Amino acid sequence: MGGQEAYCCTCLVDYQPFATTFSGAAASSPSGGAPIDPMQLERILRSQGFGSRAECRALVLAGRVSLGGQPVDDPDLEIDPDGLIFSVDGEHWAYRTQVYLAMHKPAGYECSRQPQHHPSVYTLLPRPLLLRNTQAVGRLDVDTTGLLLFSDDGQFIHRCTAPKRALCKVYEIGTRHPLTADQLAALLDGVQLHGEAAPLCATACEQLAPCQLRLSVTLGKYHLVKRMVAAAGNRVETLHRSAIGGLTLPADLPPGEWRWLSAADLERLA
């Protein structure tokens, strides 16, 4: 997959109840902000990742852009972007000042724009979002599944990944061997990892089945969960991130698909 046709969500506009309804400023900026002045249609398209000034003007002049179901041929048309829904080649888009997404990352994808051995997770996003320099918020290993955030907001990315922030991440783990009470205690009390000055501990640890564990950590170190479980005397076989902060991966979001974050979702990450 890839390019403008690789839309991996079922709908680009309506995601109830997880995403916002597109009315007023909530559609353009889920995190709030000042009202936006009217903008030329060509500039709106550029801001939403549809190419250069010349490319966006060409889209409009070719009749490929519609407003309210009607083609528009004037790239200089002044439009209020708040709550705006437009179509490009029949695909509906809502105007948003910045990108905030949640993806259900599938196994077998690298969180890199220059993958080494597997497809890039960025191939699961449509081209306009890539042209807006949308970035993964942190990384998941190629074989790890679950909640992965994306944004083009540098401050948001920093807030979510800064070590001092200590944002909690919850993982569902399948282990090779049945878990023991000593292993659970070690994960909570702290395990010593190679290259670390002090033992690292989980903030919560719950055994779900003989070989199933739910683990919460606040650090973002390389292969942290796998290394912690190994240091406790077991081995990770499957790893799935189910939550970040107060935001849980929606049960109805299939692997490989993504959704916009609503204002309520962003508050859960605050």
Image (tube, rainbow, N blue to C red):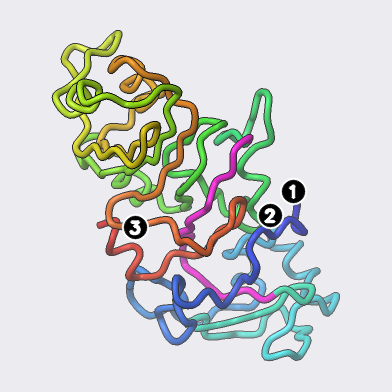
Q: Are marks 1 and 2 in contact (CB under 8 Å)?
A: yes
Give the magenta range.
92-108
Q: Nearer the viewer, mark 3 or mark 2?
A: 3
Say few, some or many: other residues with alpha carbon within 10 Å of mark 2 (under 14 / 14 to 19 / 20 or more).
Answer: some
What residue is pinned by disc 1? 2
Where residue 127 is drawn, which disc sits there? 2
The residue positioned 20% from the left and 21% from the top of the image is: 182
The x, y position of residue 151, in whole percent, is 46, 53
Residue 59 in which image quadrant: bottom right
Task: Looking at the picture, tell me which residue is in the foreground, 48 or 26.
Answer: 26
The residue labelled by disc 3 is 247
Expressed as whole percent of the image width and height from the top left, the position of residue 57 reads 75, 70
Give the amino acid at mark 1.
Gly
Q: Which image quadrant is residue 40 in?
A: bottom right
For residue 154, which numbered disc appears in the image? Answer: none
What amino acid is labelled 3 in the image? Leu
Query: Which quadrant of the figure contains the C terminus?
Result: bottom left
